[in-house]
Each structure stands twice: as structure tokens, then as C-alpha cells.
Amino acid sequence: DTGVSQDPRHKITKRGQNVTFRCDPISEHNRLYWYRQTLGQGPEFLTYFQNEAQLEKSRLLSDRFSAERPKGSFSTLEIQRTEQGDSAMYLCASSRRLAVNYNEQFFGPGTRLTVL
Amino acid sequence: AQSVTQLDSHVSVSEGTPVLLRCNYSSSYSPSLFWYVQHPNKGLQLLLKYTSAATLVKGINGFEAEFKKSETSFHLTKPSAHMSDAAEYFCVVSPGTDKLIFGTGTRLQVFP
């Protein structure tokens, strides 16, 4: 069973540069989530997709952030004009939507972004 | 709005002694509650979940949690700590079938 994978695992960039992260969910999962975790805090929800449709975006997701899931499989998260405050761990999770009130989310190892 | 409060940022125990990690929740209706664990350099892993079935929930690695509506609590316990339990633990609430809302975490240290 292949879990959720994320690439790259680490990214160091200079302020003002654009970065893109990729997430590959578990193959049969139709829901995909992005979270951000800063040091000493719990993960915070950013956005999620059901298949290729982006169903919800957090207010944390400024207009510099954009996420896509073009074919309902992998997803990308792009940050334009990075700022030092964007430094964080970006986590991806996936789930298979069921007809009950909870679907377990499986998390990837995360991409750690450092903005210099 | 739903939220969770983890009452302790750090908990230290000796190996073989009981573990108690405290969590209170706020919800306008019956919530779904979870505990996740995060080991260094590893992904978040689900320990256990409460979804309005039995109030005492058993999870992996000997952990369990009890949902107490009257106290709005969902504390995580384990009878005997093991060195491998040292990690960050997150109490989580879900408003539905979409996003998870995490607490700020409790770092568990286990001393030999």
C-alpha cells in the first residue's frame, strides 16, 4: 500500500521567488487536503479538493497561494512571491469519501519550506 | 465554531507510568473527535477516533480516550508509557466530512 507522497521534502528559497509543491495521494482516494504547520503549532487547514473540484479555501490562503488538482489525481500548491512568513511545513492528506460522517485522512511526510 | 484546547503543551512521564494528555472541545453539536500522533520526521498518524458510537474509544499502541459530553473533554490515556511513545500529540475536531481542526499539540517526553 503506497501512502501519500510529497515532493520535495525540503525547499529553501529566497524571498520573492515562486515555489511549487506536489502531492500524490493514495490512488483510490478522491479527496485531497492541504494544511500548513508552523513551528510549535498544530496544522491549519488551507484547502481541499474532491476529485478535481476545489471545494473550500481557508482565509489563510492569500491570493499568492494557488492549488490545483487538474485530473483528480496529484495536486500542486504554488506560492508566488514568497515571504519569510511562508516558512512552514506544508502537509498533504487524502481520504476516500464515505457515506458516513467521517473519512479518515492519511497524511504525507510534508514539505518543509524555508524562505530566506 | 468548533475548536479544541489542549491543556498541556508538555507532559513528562517515566517509562511504565500512566499517560494522560488532556483535551477540551467546543462544538455547537455532537462532534467527531480524534487524536493524531506526530513522530519527528514522520507523517501524522491517526491514533483513534470518536464518531458518536461508544464513548470509550480504543486506539493503536494501547491508547484510549473517553468522550465526556458533560465535561466537553476527550482526554487521551495509556496505562503504561513506553519510550517509543515520545512524540507530539494532537487533539482534533472535525466539523464534518471535510477539514480537520487541530489543537496546538502536547509534546510527550518519556524518561527511562
Image: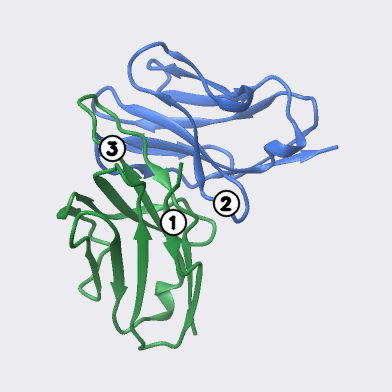
Chain colours: A green, B blue
* Left or right position of B28 against B50: left
For image coordinates 52% across by 25% down, the residue present is: B75
| Residue A66, position as x, y percentages in the image | 23, 69
Residue extending farthest top = B54
User: Quadrant of the rendered structure where residue A60 is?
Assistant: bottom left
Residue type pointed to by label 3 = Arg
Q: Which residue is mark 3?
A: A96
Q: Secondary structure at mark 3?
A: loop
Badge 2 is on which residue?
Answer: B42
Observer-nearest of A16 and A98: A98
| Residue at x 46%, y 50% (from the top left corner) | A42
- In space, the residues marked 2 and 3 are separated at their CA atoms by 22 Å
* Residue B41 located left or right of residue A70: right
Distance from label 3 to label 1 (Cα)? Answer: 16 Å
Which quarter of the figure has residue A92? bottom left
Q: Position of residue B12 (x, y in %)?
A: 73, 38
Residue A54 lies left or right of residue B49; in this view the side is: left
Q: Chain of mark 1?
A: A
Q: Which residue is mark 1?
A: A5
Chain name for mark 3: A
Q: Secondary structure at mark 1?
A: strand
